Amino acid sequence: MRSRDCKNQHYGDEEMKAKIRFFARFRELLGTDIITDPLAGTTLAALVSNIARNNKEGYDAIFDEHGNFREFVILMQNGKRVETADAGTIMVADGDEIAIFPPVAGG
Amino acid sequence: MTIKVQKEDVDIGALISAAKTPETGAVVVFDGIVRDDDITEMELEAYDEVAVAEMEKIAKAATEQFHLLHVDIIHRIGRLTVGENILIIVVSAGHRPEAYAGSRYIIEELKKSVPVWKKELTKDGGRWVPGEHGHGAGKPGSAL
């Protein structure tokens, strides 16, 4: 699955690759290991939002009615936690792995 | 130290033997097991690379804080049936207070921060087990 839906966040012509990994319920609704080619300047929030729009239930599980990440959603960029409140200002970089998941429940 | 996410079961006896050093006075084993909550099976999923890295961080912190001599953490994934092992934590210490406290610390921290999810499968479908600690508003660089 590929997405070129991030043109609204387009600040340049440089093409990149990024991998989106959803887990648990989000994976069931949206799939996982999705390779995208966002344009330079795409934010984490825009990237996830565009992919999630492929499934309404999946989108609604992650974003609230205002388009903000739901409070419990956890976001990682290359294995490092990112505050969802900052996802609208952090840019996706080439080769990024973005993970989105609900609260952990191991053990 | 063995820190793994894996499908296979674990030889707990072998882990206990390997955890003993000449300085060991106590070994504590935590064995988390699939409980029969009116389920048929349990499906476990992990963000493997991050889960292992996080468990390594927890093991290191526990070792330093409780002066542990040896730590193993093995979290299973895949489809498990009632009675099967989910999580094995083996700690070795000079004395029992450190061994018990270290083991308790590891399981409690693991439940907060290690990206693993459980789905209980029932005759009518399935339900994701809700996390005890999770929300997305924590500080980056903290436990998760």
Image (tube, coloured by chain):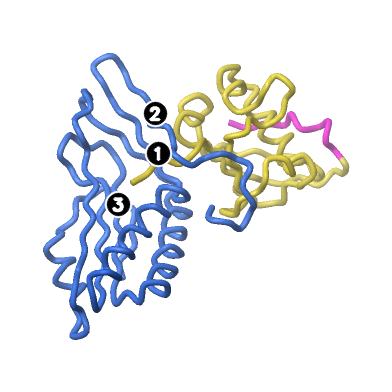
Whether callout 2 and callout 3 share a subunit is answered yes
| Boundaries of the magenta span | A1-10
- For disc 1, the marked residue is B117
Q: Colour of chain A?
A: yellow
To which chain does the residue with label 2 belong? B
Residue pictured at 21% horizontal, 64% vertical: B28
Disc 1: CA contacts within 10 A as few (<14), some (14-19) or many (>=20):
many
Q: B42 left or right of A83?
A: left
User: In the rendering, which numbered label is found on residue B128?
Assistant: 2
Secondary structure found at label 2: strand
Using the rendered view, name the quadrant where residue B93 is placed: bottom left
Closest to the observer, A83 or A55: A83
- Which one is earlier in the sequence, the residue at label 2 or at label 3? 3
Whether callout 1 and callout 2 share a subunit is answered yes
Q: Amino acid type of disc 3?
A: Gln
To which chain does the residue with label 1 belong? B
- Which one is earlier in the sequence, the residue at label 1 or at label 3? 3
Chain in blue, by letter, is B
Disc 3: CA contacts within 10 A as few (<14), some (14-19) or many (>=20):
some
Q: A49 left or right of B15?
A: right
Secondary structure found at label 1: strand
Residue pictured at 19% horizontal, 69% vertical: B27
- Which one is earlier in the sequence, the residue at label 1 or at label 2? 1
Q: Nearer the viewer, mark 2 or mark 3?
A: 2
| Magenta span contains residue B90 | no
